[in-house]
Amino acid sequence: MNQIIRTILLEWKERKLPNVIKRDFMLDVTLNNKVKNATVCTGFRRVGKTYILLEAIERLLKTYSREDVIYINFEDERIIKPETNLLTELIPEIESLFGKKPKYLFLDELQVIPNWSKWVRRVLDSESIQIFITGSSSKMSSSELPTELRGRAWEVKVNPLNFSEFLRFKNTKIDSLYSSFDFLFNEFLTFGGLPAVVLSTEDKKQELLQAYFRTVVQKDITERYKVVNDNALKTLLKFLINSNYITISKLSNNFKSIGLGVGKTTIDKYISYIKSSYFMDELKMFSPKIINQLGYPRKTYFIDNGFLTSLSTKFSKNFGRLFENLVYQELANENEELFYWKDNKNREVDFVTLKDNKVDSLYQACYDITDEETFEREIKSLFRAKKVLGCTNLNLVFFGKTDFPKSVEGIKIIPASEFFKI
């Protein structure tokens, strides 16, 4: 194992860093020996976590040497069987090779190494080294970190590109945007914001998204959780991608209808694996009584619109569903508590945000409000929810250049260009 580490370290010393397109945020790399916490970058595969690290490294290398700033990708295929002693030997090997301990360690996909968190805690307690980690599992998120790192790690959640970043990756200046807003936003709406997909030609986008999906199924779910029934997992993913609402009972019946007997416990367990990979989120119905929230169907939302386009048979051309998924991602990034609301007459509000355990705002996401019947349905649901939930912050987000006033009867009418912060 020592020889593998040594080879990787020597390659790092000579490695040329790629050109990095800057995101809207950067890692704080200030050397701080008073607060010894690790920085953990979490998020779905291919959202750009590695490039966030490399951008930080690029800034550091203006001041420090490669011996001071070390980067290792633990999914390097030469690390055939990850073992705990690989980490145990890492710092001694760096010191032996370079004559000193590093000031910074950037450790990509560290979660593949057994007992990684105990090693990180020991280094934080015994060394003056700043540690930056990435991981593609929610097990590395602040809410699920191993006990030994509770209170000893800052979490930085990395998401797919937002629309502002998308424009930067497309090398489009905002000043000249509005003449081509429809075209650019429809590309973002259809193919999403995974960086490499954004930079790919249109004929390669679906192929790349499907390859990413296969990697998630294989590495982040099947291999990580040792899933035996791979066929059931793939079938479940297809059901989820093509569903607006889910219940375990309905999914179980779907399996029975195609001749597959998959138990409800297994379905629930597989859904937890899928969510752990950041591929999918569930949205519960808002009710003051938690037991009611658990009893109603949950809505499904996905990390990136590109997967709905490339994998769904039901939503690939459904711009309304794609638009709602985008609005969900934007709101989920800004609100810790998010629900949907529905009454017994099927009047529905897409998103309910909470603040200090109280309903703070209501949002409808509507791709096209030029149809009068659709518009009336959306605002009637908002008015009903306003009365039931006692919320006056009502919002309707729409796409297009429709000439609407800023508000209608107390409802804020928000065009996509404003909502997505252009």
Image: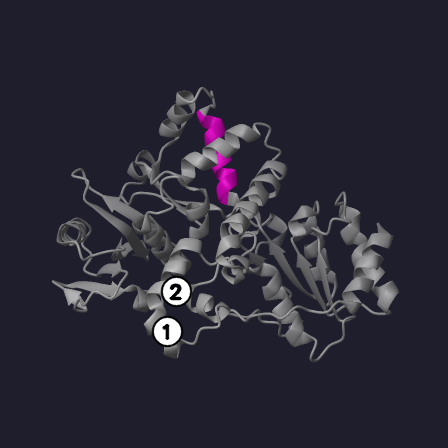
Colour basis? one colour
Seen at 64% across and 76% down, the residue is 59
Q: Secondary structure at mark 2?
A: helix
The residue where tag 1 is placed is: 177
Q: Is residue 409 above or below residue 282?
A: below
Check if mark 2's residue and mark 1's residue have beta carbons within 8 Å: yes
Identified by mark 1, the residue type is Leu
Q: Is residue 381 left or right of residue 120?
A: left
* Of 407 and 373, the residue lying toward us: 373
The residue where tag 2 is placed is: 184
For label 2, the crowd category at 10 Å Cα-Cα, with few meaning under 14, some 14 to 19 and many 20 or more, is some
Count of numbered badges drawn on the protein: 2
Q: Which mark is residue 275?
A: none
Magenta stretch: includes residue 64: no
**Residue 121 image position (x, y, % from top left):** 68, 56
Q: Is residue 211 left or right of residue 357?
A: right
Compare marks 2 and 1 and give the one earlier in the sequence.
Answer: 1
